[in-house]
Amino acid sequence: MSESQWNQQGATLSHKNACREFGFTEDEIIDAVRAGKLQCRQNYAHGNPYLKLLRTEVESLALELRGGKDVEAQKLKHDLQKVDTEIVSLKRRLASLERHKSELLERARQAT
């Protein structure tokens, strides 16, 4: 693989994210690395080690092991979780802005 793939944004993912996105176990990832089906690099985040994998290879492995239908179902499930998380985050932000607006209106009424 070319070096540029390792540096492109979105072209890699951690082994933890591969497990979440594609429904793998850590053992399956490690076995695939040992079998030469996945390339990996060891990185560290805040002193904690993790495996950095190429997304295209993880997708190919998922298709090989689980088939297209299961991979698509897992992808939809993961995307739905991301959307749900974003909705909750936006609701919290909206509630915070509404409180701030109320405080500003109250202070504006008191000032006049």
Image (tube, rainbow, N blue to C red):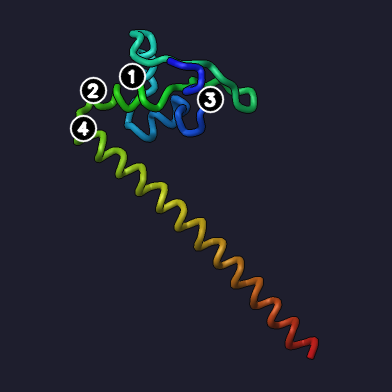
Callout 2: helix, strand or loop?
Answer: helix
Amino acid type at image mark 4: Gly
Q: CA distance from mark 3 to mark 2?
A: 27 Å
Callout 1: helix, strand or loop?
Answer: helix
Amino acid type at image mark 2: Leu
Amino acid type at image mark 1: Glu
Q: CA distance from mark 4 to mark 2?
A: 9 Å
Look at discs 4 and 1 and give the one toward the viewer.
Answer: 4
Callout 4: helix, strand or loop?
Answer: helix
The dot on residue 18 is none
Look at discs 1 and 2 and give the one toward the viewer.
Answer: 2
Q: CA distance from mark 1 to mark 3?
A: 24 Å
The residue that disc 4 covers is 68
Q: Quadrant of residue 112?
A: bottom right
Proximity of marks 1 and 2: CB atoms separated by less than 8 Å: yes
Callout 3: helix, strand or loop?
Answer: helix
Question: Would residue 72 be found to the left or right of residue 21 on screen?
Answer: left
Badge 4, how many Cα within 10 Å: few under 14, some, many 20+? some
Give the mark, 3 or 2, whose residue is nearer the N terminus. Answer: 3
Q: CA distance from mark 1 to mark 2?
A: 10 Å
Residue 101 in the image, given as x and y percentages of width and height: 64, 75
Give the mark, 1 or 3, whose residue is nearer the N terminus. Answer: 3
The residue that disc 3 covers is 7
Amino acid type at image mark 3: Asn
The dot on residue 65 is 2
**What residue lies at 50% left-to-right and 17% top-to-bottom?**
3
Give the mark, 4 or 3, whose residue is nearer the N terminus. Answer: 3
The dot on residue 28 is 1
Q: CA distance from mark 4 to mark 1?
A: 18 Å
Residue placed furthest toward the top: 35
